[in-house]
């Protein structure tokens, strides 16, 4: 089954076609890589899928449902999570709370605080950040901030995880 499908996806910044008439299809269970030089439009495509940006034209479907133009939080709650090339951690919050927030925000918004903390703690173990979970996220190295974003994204319990340049370049 197709989990993510794009047809004719197009985004302009002024006169610049950052993403031009792109078709794609990602199957359930597939690890799908998007490659291209700097400026090719990879991040812009992620922004279109997660609705941080709206396309000029084209359609994006998640599990067959048209998600084009929905609010980002709705897309997240449907099961699409992402990380950011330029990290966007909640800088002054402890590492643990960044992930707890993901757990509360995602697919199970009614989750109890206790369960959210337990889940976040497990995910921080998984990404190797248990030892630094009490410090503010801004005090993590960049590599660890990227790990934190993976944990926060996973905490939303996604069916589709979008990783934008997890490693440098
Ligand atoms: N918010 C923006 N405003 C104007 N131009 C942008 C914006 N975001 C990206 N671009 C331009 O769109 C093109 C694609 O950028 P981007 O999606 O970041 O590429 P990649 O992630 O593949 O390096 C580049 O030419 C970039 O300068
Ligand atoms: Mg990019």
Image (spheres, helix red, strand yellow):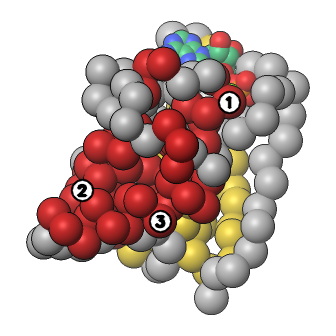
* 131 sits left or right of 67 in the view: right
Q: Estimate how packed mark 3 is, as few (under 14), some (14 to 19) or many (20 or more) residues with alpha carbons within 10 Å.
A: some
What numbered label is drawn on residue 122?
A: 3
Q: CA distance from mark 3 to mark 1?
A: 19 Å
In the rendered structure, are the residues bearing label 3 and label 1 in contact, judged by CB atoms less than 8 Å apart?
no
Q: Residues within 10 Å of mark 2 (few under 14, many from 20)?
A: many
Q: Residue at x 70, y 60 (%)?
A: 24
Q: Position of residue 54 (x, y in %)?
A: 39, 37
Q: Is residue 98 among the parts visible in the rendering?
A: yes
Q: Name the residue: 14% across, 71% down.
A: 112
Residue picked out by circle 2: 105
Q: Nearer the viewer, mark 1 or mark 2?
A: 1
Q: CA distance from mark 1 to mark 2?
A: 24 Å
Residue marked by disc 1: 143
- Give the structural element (helix, strand or loop) at label 1: helix
Q: Nearer the viewer, mark 3 or mark 1?
A: 3
Which residue is at 26% across, 49% downward?
101
Q: Indicate the position of residue 96 as horizontal and vertical percent values.
A: 36, 45
For discs 2 and 3, the disc positioned in front in the rendered view: 3
Task: Work out whether 65 lies above or below 33.
Answer: below
Contact, CB < 8 Å: mark 1 with mark 2?
A: no
Nearest the eye: 50 or 165: 165
Q: Picture quarter containing residue 53? A: top left
**Residue 41 position in % (x across, y down):** 69, 30
Q: Quadrant of the C terminus?
A: top right
Tell me if residue 27 comes above or below residue 93 in the rendering: below
Of the numbered discs 3 and 1, the one sitting upstream in the chain is 3
């Amino acid at each position: 089954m197709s989990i993510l499908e794009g047809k004719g996806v197009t985004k302009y910044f002024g006169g610049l076609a950052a993403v031009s008439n792109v078709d794609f299809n990602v199957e359930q269970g597939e690890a799908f890589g998007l490659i291209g030089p700097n400026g090719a439009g990879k991040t812009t495509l992620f922004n279109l899928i997660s609705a941080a940006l709206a396309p000029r034209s084209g359609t994006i479907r998640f599990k067959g449902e048209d998600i084009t133009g929905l609010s980002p939080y709705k897309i997240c709650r449907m099961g699409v999570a992402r990380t950011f090339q330029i990290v966007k951690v909640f800088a002054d919050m402890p590492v643990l709370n960044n992930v707890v927030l993901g757990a509360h925000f995602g697919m199970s918004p009614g989750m109890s605080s206790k369960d959210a903390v337990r889940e976040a703690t497990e995910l921080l173990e998984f990404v190797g950040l248990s030892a630094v979970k009490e410090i503010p996220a801004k005090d993590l190295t960049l590599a660890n901030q990227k790990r934190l974003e993976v944990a926060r994204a996973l905490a939303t319990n996604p069916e589709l995880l979008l990783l934008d340049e997890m490693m440098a370049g």
